[in-house]
Structure formats: structure tokens, C-alpha cells
Image (tube, grey):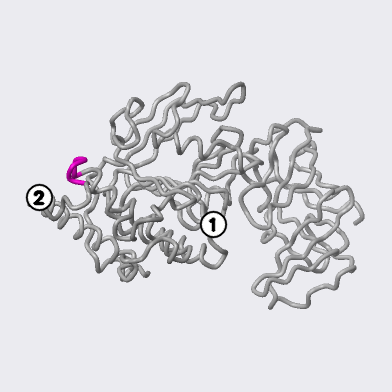
């Protein structure tokens, strides 16, 4: 499904402002275990926000509270400027897409898509079997519902599937039907809780592109929960990185990756993971990293221990540079075709340092060879003892190596 194809099928646009979601001071505990610890979020109307974090961090609980499927202990939720804390899920004008698809197995795809509209537009008598054949009003409503269902099916390219039942569908087809059932309601907000986790890797890549295109087409607020950083980085306007019930950073994907404010965010986002090396602040505006001197001033007292982090793509291996560098033993070469990752064991570092290497850039060293890793002072990130980002300034101190 391409962006051009999406654009060929008209679909009602949301009214401005109706999809803004504001969360204030949200807390939730299960027994004696705190799950959410005072969450504050302001999600703009029409924004695609992903809540990203490891299992058990509270992201799904936050989603369920916004949906009205869980009750918070304290705090409030507003949707479209209206407090919804006392409203049931069906009164909040939201639509949720679950990990398990939650399709009715005995119904056709058409009827699965039609259920939300029948529940909203018909009373219990109008929903009885045969009612559509007897009452003129019911026939008129059913005709409107059929038009809406076929319009959504056209957008999602599932028109040939309308007569099938869920057990006749592939995983990707079931996911489209689940999204379509949410779309047909024209909600203020789409809530998606790990919707792609049951799909294989290739289909996940395809479906996340479709969901991102769908968001751009509809212009509706999407709140998406996942532990998969690739989904978060490729689809989101902003990412909420959560750990232990607290949002550590809320920012666009590029900022989360390049400018993390917390060491936990830096470690969690990025594949391979960011390299973290021990450092000690020196007098005169520099940082000692295992004997290599990084010419950056931290503003911290001399002798303060810090963590120096650098992404694999910012490192290089080659002839001994004039600036800061470390020497180590190449213990593993990970060839992924378009990228090669070199794992270098360095003394006093528990985990090998990973260096990204362009396969077209010179000869790849052999495993077991001693290599030199250049540390670019302008690419390092420094975190204090609490894991908080330290602002750096340039220094005139030259880099060196302990063995130079």
C-alpha cells in the first residue's frame, strides 16, 4: 500500500483539536508494586507518539488507562480538552488495536468491521438477526454501514477478504482487519498496543510502513506502544522512552538517538548498543578514558568518575591517529552485508567495543589482530554518576594514549 494509493480513497478528516491527549500526574500501583510514578504527557492533535520501553516498564498500563480499561490511582486524562477519567472506554471516542487482533472468529471480515458501527448506530432490536430485512430504518442504517466498511476496506486493500473469516486470513491480513475495525469508527485517537509483535520480521517491516502511511493519510492522533526500537524510530513524530514507570525522555527519534539526556536512553536506543567506557575528569578541561585523553571540559570537579559513550558509527579503526585512541584485540567480525561490525576487546572494559565499518572502506582486519580505535572527541557523550547527560565544552588539551 503506497502513499499514492492511500490518497485515492477519500476518508473523513478529524476535526482540529479533537485528538489532543493530556496526561497529568498519573500514578498506578498493583498491590505494593508501583507501576506508574507520576506521568505527565502532552500529545498533540494528529501526532504519532510511540511509548517505548522494556517489558514491565508500565507502557501498556499507561495505554490501558488512557483507553479506560484500567483506573489510575491518581492523576487525570484529557482527550480533546475533556476530562475522561469518569468515562467508560466506549464513551472516550478512541479505538484500540490489540496485539492479539481480537477478531470475532465466527464473523466474516465484513461483519468484524461493521460491529463498532452497528453497536453505535443500532439499538439491541436493530441488531437482532433478520431485523435488517424487516425495518426500513435498519435497512437504511445498514446501507450506510456497508458504505463505510467498503470505504475502509478500499483504503486498506482488503476488499477481496470481506467474505472470509479470521481463520482464513494470514497474520498480516488479520492485522489490516484489526486496524480497519478501529478506522471505521473515525475515533479521536488510535491506541495501538504492540500490534506487530505476532508477525514475522519481514512482515513487521512492511506493516510499520503501512501504519506510518495510514497515519499521514488520516491525520488522526496515534499512540503506539512497543518494545521494538525500530518501530519507534521509523514511525514516530516523538518517542516517549519509559523505564520503571517514568518517562526518561520525550523527543523526536533523531534527538533520542543523537542527543539522549539519560544513559539508560542512550543504552536502550540504537543497534548495536552504544559503547560505554569509564572516564575520569582531569584538571585543565579533559577526560581520561583508559589512558586516552578526550579534550572536552565537563565543568565537573577533577577526579569525578563519568561514563563516556560513543556510537559504533562514530568510531574508526586504522593507523594510530594523533588524537585520543585505544588499542585492543579484534575478537569478532560481524558481517551484515551493508555493514560490518568489529568487536574489539579492550583491557579493563567488560564488553567489547563495537565499531561500524563500511565494507567498501579498505581491508577488514582479521580476527585476533591488534587494532587501534580512534575516539573522536566531538562525537562522545558524557554522563555523570546518576546517568544524567553532562554538557561539554571544547578544550585545548591534546589527546594522547597511555602507551604512546
Which residue occupies 58% across, 47% down? 259
Residue 235 horizontal/vertical position (percent): 46, 56
Left or right of 146? Residue 109 is: right
Which residue occupies 76% across, 48% down? 294
Residue 321 horizontal/vertical position (percent): 80, 63
Which residue occupies 36% across, 37% down? 21
User: Can you tell which mark lies on residue 338?
Assistant: none
Which residue occupies 57% across, 48% down? 227
Residues rendered magenta in the picture: 121-127
Judging by the rendered image, the residue that carries numbered circle 2 is 135
Residue 47 horizontal/vertical position (percent): 37, 47
Quadrant housing the N terminus = bottom left
Most foreground residue, 166 or 77? 166
Left or right of 370? Residue 274 is: left
Residue 177 horizontal/vertical position (percent): 37, 59
Quadrant housing the C terminus = bottom right
Most foreground residue, 120 or 238? 120
Q: Main secondary structure of the magenta part?
A: loop
Most foreground residue, 211 or 337? 211
Crowding near pointer 2: few (<14 within 10 Å), some, many (20+)?
few
**Mark 2 or 1, closer to the camera:** 2
Q: Marks 2 and 1, how far apart in space?
A: 42 Å
- SS type, badge 2: loop
Most foreground residue, 306 or 218? 218
Residue 238 in view:
no
Left or right of 274? Residue 227 is: left
- SS type, badge 1: loop
Judging by the rendered image, the residue that carries numbered circle 1 is 198
Vertical position of residue 389 compared to residue 25: above or below: below
Residue 28 in view:
yes
Left or right of 362? Residue 58 is: left
Vertical position of residue 317 compared to residue 311: above or below: below
Amino acid at each position: 500500500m503506497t502513499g499514492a494509493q492511500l490518497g485515492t480513497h477519500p476518508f473523513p478528516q478529524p476535526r482540529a483539536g479533537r485528538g489532543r491527549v493530556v496526561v497529568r500526574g498519573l500514578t498506578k500501583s498493583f498491590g505494593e508494586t508501583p507501576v506508574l510514578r507520576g506521568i505527565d504527557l502532552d500529545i498533540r492533535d494528529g501526532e504519532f507518539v510511540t511509548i517505548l520501553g522494556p517489558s514491565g516498564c508500565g507502557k501498556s498500563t499507561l495505554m490501558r488507562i488512557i483507553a479506560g480499561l484500567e483506573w489510575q490511582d491518581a492523576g487525570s486524562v484529557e482527550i480533546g480538552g475533556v476530562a475522561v477519567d469518569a468515562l467508560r472506554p466506549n464513551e472516550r471516542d478512541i479505538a484500540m488495536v490489540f496485539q492479539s487482533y481480537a477478531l470475532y472468529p465466527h464473523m466474516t471480515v465484513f461483519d468484524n468491521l461493521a460491529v463498532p458501527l452497528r453497536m453505535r448506530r443500532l439499538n439491541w432490536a436493530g441488531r437482532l438477526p433478520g431485523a435488517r430485512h424487516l425495518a426500513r430504518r435498519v435497512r437504511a442504517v445498514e446501507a450506510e454501514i456497508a458504505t463505510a466498511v467498503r470505504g475502509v476496506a478500499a483504503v486498506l486493500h482488503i476488499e477481496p477478504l470481506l467474505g472470509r473469516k479470521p481463520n482464513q486470513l494470514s497474520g498480516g491480513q488479520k492485522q489490516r482487519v484489526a486496524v480497519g475495525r478501529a478506522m471505521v469508527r473515525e475515533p479521536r485517537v488510535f491506541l495501538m498496543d504492540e500490534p506487530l509483535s505476532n508477525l514475522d520480521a519481514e512482515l513487521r517491516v512492511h506493516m510499520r510502513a503501512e501504519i506510518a502511511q495510514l497515519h499521514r493519510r488520516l491525520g488522526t492522533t496515534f499512540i503506539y506502544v512497543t518494545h521494538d526500537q525500530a518501530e519507534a524510530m521509523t514511525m514516530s513524530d516523538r518517542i516517549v522512552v519509559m523505564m520503571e514507570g517514568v518517562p526518561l525522555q520525550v523527543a523526536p527519534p533523531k534527538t533520542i538517538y543523537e542527543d539522549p539526556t539519560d544513559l539508560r536512553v542512550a543504552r536502550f536506543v540504537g543497534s548495536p548498543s552504544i559503547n560505554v567506557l569509564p572516564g575520569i575528569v582531569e584538571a585543565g578541561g579533559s577526560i581520561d578514558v583508559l589512558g586516552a585523553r578526550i579534550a572536552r571540559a565537563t565543568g565537573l570537579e577533577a577526579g569525578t568518575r563519568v561514563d563516556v559513550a560513543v556510537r559504533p558509527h562514530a568510531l574508526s579503526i586504522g593507523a594510530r591517529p594523533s588524537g585520543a585512541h585505544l588499542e585492543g584485540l579484534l575478537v569478532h567480525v560481524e558481517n551484515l552485508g551493508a555493514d560490518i561490525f568489529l568487536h574489539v576487546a579492550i583491557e579493563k572494559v567488560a564488553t567489547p567495543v563495537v565499531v561500524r565499518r563500511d565494507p567498501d572502506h579498505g581491508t577488514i582486519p582479521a580476527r585476533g589482530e591488534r587494532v587501534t580505535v580512534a575516539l573522536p572527541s566531538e562525537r562522545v557523550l558524557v554522563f555523570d554518576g546518576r546517568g544524567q547527560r553532562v554538557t561539554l565544552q571544547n578544550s585545548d588539551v591534546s589527546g594522547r594514549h597511555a602507551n604512546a
